[in-house]
Amino acid sequence: MSKHPPMGSMSCWPQWSIPGVGPLWPCFDRVQIVSSESVGALKALLPVAQLQRACHSFNVLTYQGPDPRLQSCIVIVGTRNAKPWLTLAHHEAVLGRYRVTQAEVAFDAHAHSIADASEKFFALNGMLTKPRHQRRCLWSVHKPDNDPRPGYVSAPTFYFEDRKSSVKLKAYLRHQKLPGRGFGGPCVRLEWTLTGRRALTRHIGGNGIQHLLTADLNSFIKRNLRLERVDHAALGNLLFPPRRIPLTLKRHGTTRITARKGQPSWSCASLPTASATNLATGMPPGERAETHRRRSGAI
């Protein structure tokens, strides 16, 4: 990756670019926050309309988990701006006892068309990996018979961890998410899903609103993205060492021998003769190469 001039923390501008793919635009995608306040209280006290204009989507749902102290769950799908987190920070007292339980850190590489996005997507997946990839898990999901949901593209999604991991990485094609549930042009998306307090603390500093607001996502990708370029020719030579081409090649008849730059070069030709040949040398038994060369030339 090549580095651009540094920018501020939680910058929505890219600092990193992948050759053949383009600059990576950072943002928080889906963020889940659980709260001890009721759904009705949050809808009444939070500036819901303002949040819906700033986010791709904003929903307050009933908490369905096992903790009896919690009543509501806020699900925010962000875009490339920090307005939702600023708004929530100004109304943090309204949330009561709360915590962020899951956050998706996304990076988009813009494309001119679906074909351009597809080319960049497969170029990226050809060299993409992640640090401490102990499970060595890589699997693809594609449902070409199903119509894609709004904003999605009918293409494979590559997963680099199983579903139980607290830090999951996936890559896929989609349309850019815009505020107010809108969609933009096609892009290639890299997405890390951080689940639980431990993963959130390790990667963005904690599980509070302030940590979302001050997270340096460009530093995050610097620490967590690994690119490996495979020399397929060298790999093939390592696994299957090249063999010397045999001096003879026999197919459907005897072998014609020609001379090229002082070295014998062998080409296959089906000749009208039907004499027996030696499988190892391509010559009649007991006959030397010199004699056979003259005989073949005469034919």
Image: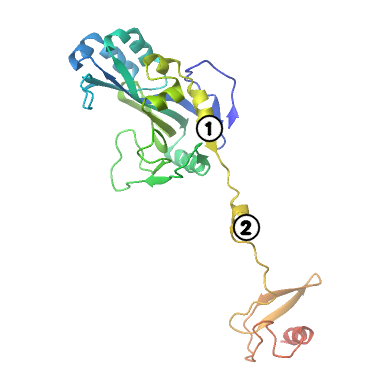
- Mark toward the viewer: 1 or 2: 2
Residue at the spot x=41%, y=40% of the render?
161
Q: Quarter of the image holding residue 84? A: top left
- Residue 131, given in percent of the width and then of the height, sits at 51, 36
Residue receiving disc 1: 22
| SS type, badge 1 | strand
Residue at the spot x=40%, y=14% of the render?
210
In the depicted structure, whether residue 263 falls above or below residue 293: above
| SS type, badge 2 | helix
Residue 204 appears in the rendering: yes
Q: Residues within 10 Å of mark 2 (few under 14, many from 20)?
A: few
What colouring does the structure picture have? rainbow
Counting residues from the N terminus, which is met first, the one under dot 1 or under dot 2? 1
Residue 237: assigned label: 2
- Residue 108, given in percent of the width and then of the height, sits at 45, 30
- Residue 58, given in percent of the width and then of the height, sits at 28, 20
Quarter of the image where the N terminus is located: top right
Residue at the spot x=20%, y=10% of the render?
44
Residue 59 appears in the rendering: no
Q: Seen in the image, is 46 located left or right of residue 280?
A: left
Residue 273 vs residue 59, the one in the foreground: 59
- Residue 244, given in percent of the width and then of the height, sits at 68, 68
Q: CA distance from mark 1 to mark 2?
A: 31 Å
Q: Amino acid at mark 2?
A: Asn
Q: Seen in the image, is 243 located left or right of residue 20?
A: right
